[in-house]
């Protein structure tokens, strides 16, 4: 009798062990769903492992939160999971889920910033990409400590937000600070290419960036940038007014309706009105790209003092006012008629 009881007990233990082994094998090798569904999972900073496991279970990424916890403890990954937004799938095995969360390979969102945009425009792009509010971008771009860390000799990051294609993870709190930091860091890398030997600092750097921003807004022709920078440099050296429309437009801000009028050119209240105020404007009027920075750093040496658009994307350059007036009559007044 005792032998029969012992035999039955052994059979039960073996059966239970087999069932546990089978369940463990199922958990480790069979994903929750086949085919799987992709879904976004956000792990908030400070989340404990039990909270994360429960969240994954509720979203259908794992079938057993306790088994998931035991697996993570066994592999040593229970303390290595990183906060962030992840693209997961119900078709993943638990080990693959753990590996992804421990790797920190969160979802990356692309932000493409073309040359010539203002700080306000870039802030809106960042908000549209879901990388933080425009207000948080503006706040970071005016943070004196942050600007000083990246050597920006100004009160805002205008001009120093380097145009590039970036990829970011979305940060909790809808804060765009990381975008501003990345763009400032990229500017420093670009500046090292423009001035590899002796990069300017302080006022000299700021004046170069201001000039580059004007060049960026004046032409989209790469071959003309250095020549246009040379024209403005010649005018500055001769104490001539720069008389460039893009600076006025920048100073008008949201009030500009697309139609630049004589009253705008005659208004001395606009500090960016280079028809009224001598020298460079108070600050950059956009965020220039690498080629515009190079042009400002190495202006073309010529005797040109004027240029006018030829309505084909290029410009006619002149050395004298008479030549310039003739070019204006040819390319602009004729266009008006």
Image: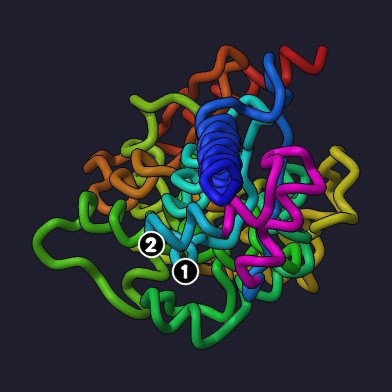
Q: Between marks 1 and 2, how big is the CA–CA gap?
A: 7 Å
Asked if the magenta segment contains residue 64, the reply would be yes
User: The magenta stretch spans which residues?
Assistant: 48-69
- Considering only vertical position in the picture, is 34 above or below 267? above
User: Which residue corresponds to the image point at 70% horizontal and 53% vertical from the top-left?
Assistant: 42
- Considering only vertical position in the picture, is 101 above or below 283? above
User: Which residue corresponds to the image point at 37% horizontal and 77% vertical from the top-left?
Assistant: 151
Q: Is residue 204 left or right of residue 301?
A: right
Circle 1 sits on which residue?
79
Q: Which residue lies furthest to the bottom in this view?
A: 145
- Considering only vertical position in the picture, is 254 above or below 301? below
Residue 168 in view, yes or no: no
Q: Nearer the viewer, residue 48 or 314?
A: 48
Confirm or deny contact between disc 1 and disc 2 (CB under 8 A): yes
Residue 191: % across, % down: 28, 57
Q: Which residue lies furthest to the left in this view?
A: 197
Q: Which of 144 and 2 is in front in this view?
A: 2
Residue 218: % across, % down: 54, 38
Residue 331: % across, % down: 62, 17
* Picture quadrant where residue 209 is located: bottom left
Per the rendering, the mark at residue 76 is 2
Looking at the image, is mark 1 or mark 2 nearer the viewer? 2
* Picture quadrant where residue 197 is located: bottom left
* Picture quadrant where residue 24 is located: top right
User: Which residue corresponds to the image point at 35% horizontal and 39% vertical from the top-left?
Assistant: 291
């Amino acid at each position: 009798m005792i032998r029969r009881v012992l035999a039955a007990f052994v059979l039960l233990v073996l059966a239970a062990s087999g069932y546990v082994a089978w369940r463990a094998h199922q958990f480790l090798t069979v994903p929750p769903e086949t085919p799987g569904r992709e879904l976004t999972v956000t792990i908030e900073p400070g989340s404990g492992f039990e909270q994360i496991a429960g969240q994954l279970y509720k979203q259908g990424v794992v079938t057993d939160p306790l088994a998931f916890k035991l697996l993570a403890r066994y592999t040593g990954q229970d303390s290595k999971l990183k906060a962030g937004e992840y693209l997961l799938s119900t078709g993943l095995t638990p080990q693959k889920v753990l590996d992804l969360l421990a790797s920190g390979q969160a979802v990356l969102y692309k932000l493409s910033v073309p040359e010539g945009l203002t700080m306000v425009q870039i802030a809106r792009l960042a908000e549209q990409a879901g990388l933080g509010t425009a207000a948080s971008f503006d706040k970071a771009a005016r943070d004196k400590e942050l600007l000083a860390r990246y050597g920006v000799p100004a009160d805002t990051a205008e001009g120093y937000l380097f145009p590039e294609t970036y990829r970011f993870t979305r940060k909790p709190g809808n804060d765009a600070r990381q975008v501003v930091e990345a763009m400032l860091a990229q500017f420093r890398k670009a500046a090292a290419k423009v001035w590899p030997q002796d990069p300017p600092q302080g006022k000299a750097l700021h004046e170069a960036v201001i000039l580059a921003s004007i060049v960026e807004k004046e032409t989209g022709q790469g071959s003309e940038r250095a020549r246009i920078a040379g024209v403005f440099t010649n005018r500055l050296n001769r104490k001539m007014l720069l008389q460039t429309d893009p600076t006025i437009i920048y100073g008008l801000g949201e009030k500009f309706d697309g139609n630049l009028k004589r009253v705008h050119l005659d208004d001395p209240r606009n500090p960016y009105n280079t028809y009224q105020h001598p020298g460079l404007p108070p600050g950059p009027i956009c965020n220039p790209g690498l080629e515009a920075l190079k042009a400002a750093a190495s202006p073309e040496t010529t005797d040109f003092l004027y240029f006018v658009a030829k309505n084909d994307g290029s410009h006619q350059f002149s050395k004298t006012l008479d030549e310039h007036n003739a070019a204006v009559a040819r390319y602009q007044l004729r266009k008006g008629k």
